Amino acid sequence: MLNRQANVNSLRIFLWNANGLKRHEPELLNLFTEKHIDIALISETHCTSNSKNFFPGYNIFRTDHPDGSAHGGSAIIISKKIQCQPLPNYKTNTIQATNILITLNHIPTIISTVYCPPRHAISSEHLSQFLNSLGRSFLIGGDYSAKHPTKHTQH
């Protein structure tokens, strides 16, 4: 198997909120094979330090919820054919992000997947701090559980 740099023209990226990764492994493996997925950005993995994931032909990088229990979390599942470097994860109660570095068309690019639990409000400062941690060239996807800050009132 020859490692390669990623080419934006042929890269297949899949984004999904799993609401529990382990129970979906067989269907994901089937999808990855059928659709030739290069990178899967998975949010709400519900993994813990005891969780084991198995995706033949793929590397998996995870960020579990900081309290160690089976909720929240994110993961990047990437084909072993693509060179990548794991980066430090961003792990708070409000943002769990998994980050890797790949080269897209000769440009070092951070790929990030995010899960933001709906019960926590994310301040614009906290979100800015996270986004600034990714540098200048990044692709990010995930479940931000975004809510509009204004409350709608009935007339």
Image (cartoon, rainbow, N blue to C red):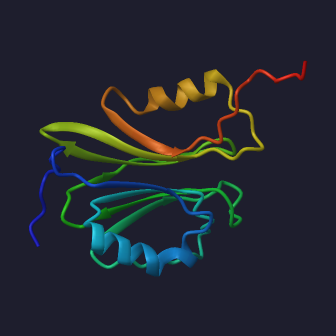
144 relative to 154, above or below: below
Q: Is residue 150 above or below residue 4?
A: above
Estimate the x, y position of residue 91 in percent, counting from the top left: 58, 47
Asked if one can make out residue 49 in the rendered structure from this viewpoint, the answer is: yes
* Residue furthest out toward the left: 2
Residue sitting at 19 percent across and 42 percent down? 104
Residue at image coords 48%, 60%: 62
Q: In this rendered view, identify the residue nearer to me: 23 or 73.
A: 23
Residue at 33%, 67% (x, y): give it.
Answer: 59
Give how far across and how far down residue 130 sits, in percent: 52, 32
Q: Is residue 57 above or below residue 9?
A: below
Quadrant where the image shows the C terminus: top right
Residue situated in front as seen by the camera: 7 or 5: 7
Horizontal placement of 47 versus 109: left or right?
right
Q: Nearer the viewer, residue 145 or 84?
A: 145
Residue 50, percent across and down? 59, 76
Q: What is the x, y in percent for residue 2? A: 9, 67
Left or right of residue 29: residue 89: right
Residue 106 vs residue 142: left or right? left
Q: Residue at x 57, y 78 (%)?
A: 23
Figure quadrant of residue 69 = bottom right
Identify the residue at the far front of this view. Answer: 155
- Residue 53 visible (yes or no): no
The residue positioned farthest toward the top in the image shown: 155
